[in-house]
Structure formats: structure tokens, C-alpha cells
Amino acid sequence: MSVAQATNPVVARPAADAVGSWVRRILNLVAITAAVLLLASVITFALGAMAKTNPAAAVLGETATEADIARLDHQFGLDRPLVVQYADWLGSAVQGDLGVSWFTTVPVSDSIAQALPVDLSIALLAIVLAILIGGAAGIGAALSNGGIFDRTVTIVCSLLGTLPPFVIGMALIVVFAVKAELLPAGGYVPIQENPAEWLRFAILPSFALSLDVAASIARQLRTSLVGALRENYAIGAQMRGFGRRRVLFGHVLRNAAAPALAVIGLAIPLVIGGAVMTEKLFGLPGIAQLALQASEKGDVPVVLGTLLVTAVVVVLASLVVNVAQTALDPASRREPAKGGLA
């Protein structure tokens, strides 16, 4: 801060107002996220309540007596009002306690702690690949606006947009696992045990999940960059002698990246949703398979836990993307008008 700014509160006030506006926007995003998470918990619990699954009949079998059913209902707290059950479940979930499996009595949080890192690592790698591939293609298409590379990117992105991840996954298995025998067709090795082996097993499912997102990023980024390069500030920079690439990377890319970030935010639920088929196809022991197996047995606590944790992951990831968008948005960094102050 200059001496004039330090001694003149009128000069310093616009910068402080801009920071305050940015903080308020972030706080609003956090408040909306908290409300969405609360609503997600209500919906998740309501789905479990509507299932009408009786743990005594499922666990004890057809030989269960009325006394056995009443005893087990009391043990699981199912003889209390639904509102009390929800409040107790939510309070425990906030503390990391999602109950125990009706069949194995293993804590649900322990089962999720083993399965969730599989999905997170695959999804994170898929997002990174999508950003790298889509970003490079979008930037290249913008620089080649109307050229051969631009038209090629448009055609390839249109084609990828029509192919679901499991179809791409099967093609990748045939090419790289069966024909070329370069990569394993399925299985998983935790990254903390052997990062190189984890990458060998994770690259195909991650690549299958990333291509559709990469195509969306490339299309959006190309459109944003072409439009931004026609703005007055970009044209003025080129007229001052700056090359097209320098203008793009030094001035335009940051402003044009926000719409591409919105694509990433929308893609996060799709990546996690696509993991259901991808896990089955590549034999991954992820949270989708845990939920599927629990639903087939009627293990409601496990199903509720996986749904809630998945919702939390999706919403928090979207919050991170929204915060990044806010930080990159030129309007959020612009100082407010001085309102006639001299």
C-alpha cells in the first residue's frame, strides 16, 4: 500500500470494499452448500425410511419370532419416531459415525473408508486428464480458429460426446489390455502401496471417464478464448506488438477460464456417477460396488452411508469449483465505483 493509500481512507476504501464483496460471495456459497447438504441428508434418510426393510427379517430369517424382531428393532433404534431417528443419525454422521452394517456389524464408516479412496483417486485422475486434454485441445483450437486443427477438435469432441464411458472403457480394454497387453484389464492397487502400479491400474478407467469431460472443456474453452481474443483489451495488446500467444496466455486465458471451470463443476457428479459402470467394468472395489452389494442385501445403513458420503463429496467438490470461479471472475476482483468521491 502506498503512502497516499495509507493516509487517505477514501482511497483505501474501494479496495477494502472489493475484498469484502469477494468474502461475502464466498460466504454465500458456503451457506448454500450447507443448505444443500442438509437437504441431501433429509432425502437420503427418507429414502431409507421408505424402503420398509425389516432388519430382523433380513438378519434372523423366517424363523424370527415377534420377540426377536422387537429386540432387534430396539437394538437398532427402529422403534423410535422417524424424526428422532433422523436427528440421531444426522448427529452421529456429523461426528463420522454412520452406524453399523445389519449383516456384518462392521462400522459403515470403516467400509466407506476402504472403498472411497478408490473412487476419489480414479475421479481425481480423470479430472486432471480431462483438464490437460481438454485445455490443450481448446487452446490449440482457439489459436487455430477456423483452421484444420480447430475443425478436427470440433469433430472429435462431437464424437466423444455421443459415447458413454463404459463403451470407451470396453474399447480401451480391447486395445490396450487384450491386443497390446500394455495395461491390466482390471483390478486395483492402493496408491500408498505402490504409486506406479496404482497408475497402471487406474489409467484406463480414469481415461474412460475423462474423455467426455475433456470434450466439453475443449468446446467451452475454445468458444470463450475466441470471444475473449476479440475484446478491446486483447486487440489493444496485439496492436502494441504483443504476439497472439502472449496475449492469450498473459491476458486472455484467466478471464476465459471461468466458463470452463463451470463445465468441470457440472462434470463432477457425472464422473462419480459414471464410476458405477466403470467400477463394474474394471473390477474396482469402490463405493459404488459397496452400495450395490448393500442394496441387493437390503443393508440400509450401508446404503444410507454411501449415498450421504457421495453427496458430500459431490457438493464439496462443486463448492471448490465455485470458489475458483469466483476468484477468477473479473467482476469479483473489480473495485466498486467510488460513487462520486473525490
Image: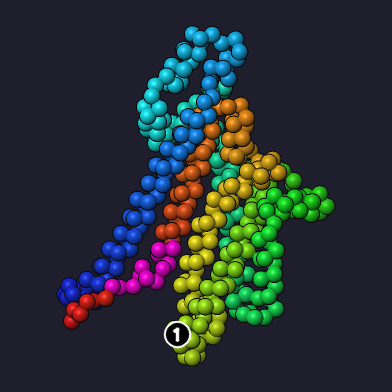
SS at mark 1 in the image: helix
The residue lying at 42 percent from left, 34 percent from top is 93
The picture quadrant where one finds residue 5 is bottom left
As drawn, 327 above or below 73: below
Dominant SS type (magenta): helix
Foreground: 35 or 19? 35
Q: Please, which residue is most extreme toward the right here?
A: 179
- Above/below status of 287 relative to 3: above
Callout 1 amino acid: Asn
Q: Nearer the viewer, residue 277 or 42?
A: 42
Report the residue at 49% width, 48% height from top.
314
Q: Quadrant of residue 84?
A: top left
Q: Residue at x 76, y 53 (%)?
A: 171
Where in the figure is residue 49, as x and y percent of width and height?
A: 48, 29
- In the image, is residue 335 above or below residue 159? below
Quarter of the image containing the C terminus?
bottom left
Q: Is residue 328 a member of the stretch shown in magenta? A: yes
Asked if residue 331 can be seen in this view, the reply is: yes
Task: Please indicate whether residue 95 sits to the left or right of residue 67 in the image.
Answer: left
| Residue 88 visible here | no
**Up-down relation of residue 122 to residue 293 (above or below):** below
Magenta-tinted stretch: 325-336
Label 1: which residue?
232
Q: 121 or 267, which is in the foreground? A: 267
Label 1 neighbourhood size at 10 Å, few (<14), some (14-19), many (20+)? Answer: few
Q: Is residue 284 left or right of residue 266?
A: right
Magenta span includes 284: no
Q: Position of residue 246 (x, y in %)?
A: 52, 81
Please identify the quadrant where the N terminus is shown: bottom left
